[in-house]
Image (spheres, rainbow, N blue to C red):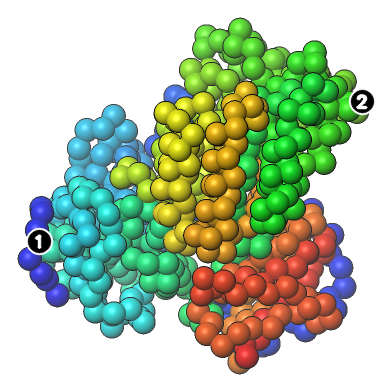
């Protein structure tokens, strides 16, 4: 198997559909309780991957202050470990959990302590640590006789365009016993470069997967496999560790109408009368592209000021989402302010908008802060205020472009734990090249196009934000033309994409997390049972392993919309509060 290494409260309605067949088995089930461990800090813990990969689940987050008491007491069926940092206290809890029959999936090698120092061997089953380099010339050798790797080829040449050092493990031989677990190496890059290993204790029922951080992600500069291979490998791994039936049709839940969401953001709009003429040509340009309804693509970061007017807000609301506020007075956002002070300033910004619009509650869903240094306590204030999305320059966004060598998942939906408390914010990254940041207009286009190349091949829910300021994009013809050029690029080069506002995505995510979703294989396809207390517009199923076409019905009466694009089928229908079923049959 080895090769040489180059580098070392729900309202239920009467069912009008047929319940899943008695002989069917569950291939997707978000009622299973899953926890994620993130190292505790004084400020913020950041989930870089699991919110996207387990998109249909309402995940629980455990930090050092909660993992020992909650991991076994709450009967979690799976613990996810997405970070390479882990405290000794957490390692002790994880070992105990595994020994008691628990299931753990290590998405990264937890060899570092929270302070960054190395402690290689705290997880008993993981064996000998290793570190290697992976680039485009690296060859992945796969044992495809296992349920996890079933359907894969024996070898793959890495698609990575980056030459990157990465942590692995080193097992010799490729199968055996360690700490009471049977292990099997499923993929390796070289003698000491085991990147996918499964562990099982058949007496206790305990299971574990160790996987390299880039095994299941396509689209970035560090991805190893294409979209189809990475997706199949992830689904097989997920089925095995959760004890689900084989995911015959590659079913998963994704963003409304498709994985890839494009948002056009206009920053620093006050919603003032004087801005109406200034932006008119821009909206006409967007209409001319015929990519989407204008309202489906624009989110305005509105600066609440004395000039904000009812007529101005009404004008912009015709062209997009006006539910994102961007408080702009830096004096209101000093780094030494407390959460309570930020809460007061958020309330002030909301009050300006409410008064201008003549409503008691404008319905904000998103906030962008004006000051990086203030963002950490400001996050908590935003969460307390009830915001669903936080779109910001702030702490841990790092302005990193998709495909950067440090990240394959910049535009995936994310979750933060602030001061040990799970927030209701989902972070969506904003690229670092607003129109006032590039060297010139062509640079604005080039940077967007470069990232969109990576975005094209992504295999999990993702959002790409094309950002322009009213001070720049709306007033400079050369920048204006290069925004037009960027939209042309999307239409011709990114495959199937969907335009959505941040408000649309926020409401979708919020409803999905409180919904019960179970899917079953049937002789001719798959059925999905959905129970929700909230309406979900364009609830979307993705099918990645169907070759001949599909038909789908909602509650046995309404036809669902079906899109086939980039080798993937998207089936979607608006789901009303209650219990419903979507039945998908193959051609």
Q: Residue 432 location, x and y as percent?
A: 46, 33
Task: Give whichever of discs 2 and 1 has the lower sequence position.
Answer: 1
* Occupied quadrant, residue 571: bottom right
Q: Please tell me whether residue 203 is drawn above or below residue 488 in the rendered image.
A: below
Residue 406, disc: none
For the residue pair 3 and 316, the one nearer the viewer reads as: 316
Q: Residue furthest right?
A: 358
Q: Looking at the picture, does residue 93 appear above or below residue 478?
A: below
Q: Residues within 10 Å of mark 2 (few under 14, many from 20)?
A: few
Q: Return the residue at label 1.
A: 5
Residue 197 in the image, given as x and y percentages of width and height: 27, 65
* Quadrant of res 218: bottom left
* Residue 483 visible, this orientation: yes
Please give the name of the residue rendered at 66% of the width and 86% of the height, measured from the top-left corner: 585
Q: Quadrant of residue 238?
A: bottom left
Which residue shows up at 62% across the image and 23% down it? 471
Q: Which quadrant of the rendered structure holds the C terminus?
A: bottom right
Find the residue positioned furthest to the front: 477
Q: Mark 2 — residue? A: 358
Question: Could you tell me which secondary element the residue under label 1 belongs to?
Answer: loop
Name the side, left or right, on which 36 lies relative to 86.
Answer: right
């Amino acid at each position: 198997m080895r090769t040489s290494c180059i580098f070392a409260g729900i309202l239920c309605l009467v069912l009008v559909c047929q319940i899943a067949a008695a002989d069917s088995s569950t291939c997707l089930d978000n009622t299973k309780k899953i926890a994620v461990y993130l190292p505790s800090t004084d400020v913020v813990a950041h989930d870089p991957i699991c919110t996207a990969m387990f998109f249909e689940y309402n995940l629980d987050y455990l930090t050092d202050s909660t993992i020992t008491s909650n991991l076994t007491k709450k009967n979690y069926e799976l613990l996810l470990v997405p970070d390479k940092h882990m405290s000794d206290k957490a390692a002790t809890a994880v070992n105990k959990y595994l020994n008691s029959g628990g299931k753990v999936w290590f998405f990264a090698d937890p060899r570092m302590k929270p302070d960054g120092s190395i402690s290689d061997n705290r997880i008993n089953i993981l064996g000998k640590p290793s570190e290697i380099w992976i680039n485009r010339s690296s060859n992945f050798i796969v044992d495809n006789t296992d349920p996890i790797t079933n359907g894969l080829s024996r070898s793959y040449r890495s698609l990575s365009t980056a030459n990157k050092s990465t942590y692995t493990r080193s097992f010799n031989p490729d199968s055996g016993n360690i700490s009471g677990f049977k292990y099997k190496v499923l993929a390796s890059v070289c003698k000491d470069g085991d990147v996918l290993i499964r562990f099982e204790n058949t007496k206790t029922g305990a299971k574990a997967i160790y996987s390299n951080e880039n095994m299941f992600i396509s689209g970035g500069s560090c991805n190893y496999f294409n979209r189809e291979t990475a997706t199949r490998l992830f689904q097989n791994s997920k089925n095995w560790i959760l004890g689900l039936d084989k995911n015959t049709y590659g079913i998963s839940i994704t963003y409304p109408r498709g994985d890839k969401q494009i948002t056009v953001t206009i920053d620093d709009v006050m919603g003032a009368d004087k801005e109406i003429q200034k932006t008119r040509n821009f909206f006409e340009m967007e209409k001319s592209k015929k990519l989407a309804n204008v309202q489906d693509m624009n989110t305005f970061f509105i600066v609440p000021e004395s000039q904000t007017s009812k007529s101005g807000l009404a004008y912009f609301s015709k062209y997009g989402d006006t539910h994102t506020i961007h408080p702009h007075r830096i004096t209101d956002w000093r780094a030494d302010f407390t959460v309570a002070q930020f809460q007061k300033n958020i309330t002030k910004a909301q009050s300006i908008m409410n008064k201008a619009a003549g409503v008691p509650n404008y319905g904000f869903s998103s906030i962008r802060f004006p000051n990086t240094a203030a963002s950490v306590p400001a996050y908590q204030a935003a969460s307390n205020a009830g915001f669903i999305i936080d779109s910001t320059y702030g702490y841990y966004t790092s302005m990193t472009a998709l495909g950067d060598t440090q990240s394959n998942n910049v535009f995936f939906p994310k979750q933060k734990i602030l001061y040990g408390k799970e927030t209701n914010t989902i972070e969506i990254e904003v690229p670092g090249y607003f129109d006032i940041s590039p060297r010139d207009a062509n640079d604005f286009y080039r940077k967007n196009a470069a990232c969109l190349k990576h975005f094209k091949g992504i295999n999990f829910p993702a959002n790409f934000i094309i950002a322009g300021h009213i001070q720049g994009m709306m007033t400079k013809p050369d920048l204006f033309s290069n925004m037009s050029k960027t939209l042309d690029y999307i239409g011709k080069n990114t495959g199937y994409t969907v335009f959505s506002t941040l408000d649309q995505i926020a409401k979708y995510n919020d409803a999905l997390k409180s919904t019960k979703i179970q899917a079953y294989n049937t002789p001719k396809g798959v059925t999905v049972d959905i129970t929700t207390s909230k309406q979900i517009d364009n609830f979307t199923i993705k099918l990645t392993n169907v070759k001949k076409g599909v038909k789908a019905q909602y509650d046995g009466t309404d036809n669902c919309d079906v899109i086939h694009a980039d080798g993937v089928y998207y089936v979607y229908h608006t789901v009303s509060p209650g219990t419903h079923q979507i039945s998908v049959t193959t051609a």
